[in-house]
Image: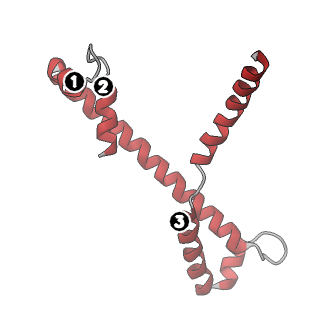
Amino acid sequence: MKRIIGVVAVATAFAMPVVAIADDQPTTTDKQNASQECKAEQSADPAAFKAKYGTGKKGANAHGKCVSQKAKAKTAAAVRHEVKADVSAAKSCKAERKADPAAFAAKYGTNKNKRNAFGKCVSKQAKD
């Protein structure tokens, strides 16, 4: 029984980083939009497109490299936007808490001592 629990614990520990990495991967929609952008760029000037994105002698992989680069850039931009929203929410919650701590705790706190008010405030404002 102890071995089974140990195996499950180890398997869970190794699975967690995979889930975290999967969240940062470009979505199918990002890839589709990037592909459309790359097709438009390629049709405008095929030679310049191959020179910019292609690797190897013939630059035959230019489209794939372009899609990959643009999809990753869009994903990174989305992550930066989420981080900015979280920081902004934390700043506004901190200011609201400083103005009237008792009212802040009453408004956002959900547990018996209302000490989770700051986290609830940030979570609520980051979602909006």
> In terms of secondary structure, where does tag 3 sit?
helix
Up/down of 91 relative to 115, above or below: below
- Mark 2 and mark 1 lie on one chain; the one further toward the N terminus is 1
- Mark 3 and mark 2 lie on one chain; the one further toward the N terminus is 3
Give neighbour class at mark 1: few <14, some 14-19, many 20+ (Cα, 10 Å): some
Q: Which mark is residue 29?
A: 3
Which color mode does the image show?
secondary structure
Point out residue 12 in the picture as x, y percentages from the top left corner. 68, 31
Q: Amino acid at mark 3?
A: Thr
Image label count: 3
> In terms of secondary structure, where does tag 1 sit?
helix
Residue of label 2: 118
Quarter-of-image position of residue 67 = bottom right
Distance from the alpha carbon under mark 2 to that under mark 1: 8 Å
Point out residue 5 in the picture as x, y percentages from the top left corner. 72, 21
Residue of label 1: 97
Residue at the (62%, 47%) spot, across then down: 22
